[in-house]
Amino acid sequence: MTAKFSLLLGTAALVASPAFADKAAVLDTYATIALAAYGDSLTSAETLQSAVTALVDAPSPDTFAAAKRAWVQARVPYQQTEVFRFGNPIVDDWEGKVNAWPLDEGLIDYVDATYGGATDENAYAVLNVIASPQFTLSGETVDATEITPALLESRLHEADEVESNVATGYHAIEFLLWGQDLNGHDAGAGARPWTDYAMGAACTGGNCDRRGEYLKAATDLLVSDLAWMVAQWQDGGDARAHLLTDETAGISAILTGMGSLSYGELAGERMKLGVMLNDPEEEHDCFSDNTHNSHFYDVLGIRNVYLGSYTAIDGTVISGASLSSLVAQADSTVDAELRAKLDATLLEMAEMKAAAEAGFAYDMMLQRGNAGGEALIMGAVNALVDQTRAIERVVAALRVDDIAFEGSDSLDDPDAVFQ
């Protein structure tokens, strides 16, 4: 265990078993952590917004690199909010606007010839809005002379009710900053040149002015969407009010989010499925090769919620009455087991993260026959499944009824993946 992760686990252990708490206090901590994490997500998105404005106003290698760094940094707090998704309908209904994936990037911009064209599943897979001031969508002519947040949100996102028509959010911005990753299982992320935002004769890729418009519109929309979600968790906000209306239902929401993200979403759809298909596109941050960080911070977010503690981007620790404490009152053995499983999962993710940062990228790990990569990913998958089983024992210890975690064919019915 590296010193960095040893310190992380040690610090969390200090807040793992505070004074016993009641349900109302636990829910208040949960909502306060949600507010802090979404607040940090908004702050980091505003930093990204400033970096994008600097890039579009004065394109250069430096402003381009700064915008990409800001995007990666913005993912750190946001991924820690995903645990709030599945148990809270307000979050789940909204999440597709900001974090939908995978996407048919040809909807947005130019793609390599090997990408193909329109399909029966998606007639707009290569629409290329950036190159099209006017186009036909669902039988209607759309004026896209000006690329605005309203155009992206109301006309393009999930156009024709196709989920892969992702026009907004982190991954649309990621594609506009990195471009396609054409390396397959080889090393390297997307290699979009900074000159895709240059003006005049220096412009590459064509339509550099419209590409800048799209990037700014998508980033502005991300900021406004996050600001809306922050408001939902403030005192009097709908998400906080809904959570606090029924204490038992509120505890159920916490556990649903923890179990669904652990099992069906992360262990299944985002990780084991990619191992089964050996597909380098089956990674969450596929353009930037940042998937290892997204997975790591998802797991950290689950742990934050159980331990009732979140470390903000400015270093402030927000903590309070924890679900761990509530479980310890009911069954201290079950609480100790889940805390140990959470630590074990985070360490597996830390190993995968360290390997990726040392040059063994996540899409390289997915290559068929790469035993080392499969071991890293499946070590984390297995830890997540074990963690979910411990969460199920928490559900039983607290006698919370009517909880169903999200599943995944890759875990529950592997043969169905290939049918």
Image: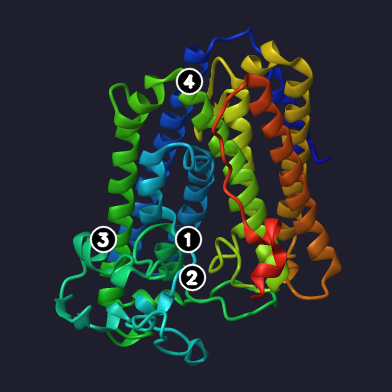
Q: Which mark is drawn over residue 178? A: 2
The circle drawn on residue 68 is 1
Left or right: residue 230 compared with residue 22: left
User: Where is residue 302 drawn, in percent x and y?
Assistant: 60, 36
Q: Label 3 neighbourhood size at 10 Å, few (<14), some (14-19), many (20+)?
A: some
Residue pictured at 30% horizontal, 70% vertical? 159
What is the C-alpha distance between the residues marked 1 and 3? 23 Å
Q: Are marks 4 and 2 in contact (CB under 8 Å)?
A: no
Of badges 1 and 4, the one in the foreground is: 4
Mark whose residue sits in front, 4 or 2: 4
Q: Split into 4 quadrants, where in the image is the N terminus?
A: top right
Precedes in sequence: disc 4 or disc 3: 4
Q: Give me the C-alpha separation between circle 1 and circle 4.
A: 36 Å
Q: Nearer the viewer, mark 1 or mark 3?
A: 3
Residue at image location 56% in from the left, 76% down from the top? 181
User: Three-letter amino acid code at disc 2?
Assistant: Trp
Camera-side residue of 209 and 248: 248
- Dividing the picture into quarters, in which one does residue 161 lie? bottom left
Q: Is residue 86 left or right of residue 278?
A: left
The label on residue 142 is none
Q: Say what amino acid the circle numbered 1 marks.
A: Lys
Q: Which mark is residue 27?
A: 4
Taking the view exactly as shown, the residue that stands out farthest to the right is 371
Return the residue found at the far front.
402
Circle 3 is placed at which residue position? 153
| Quadrant in which residue 341 is drawn | top right
Residue 372: give x, y in percent of width and height.
84, 64
**N-terminal-most mark, 1 or 4:** 4
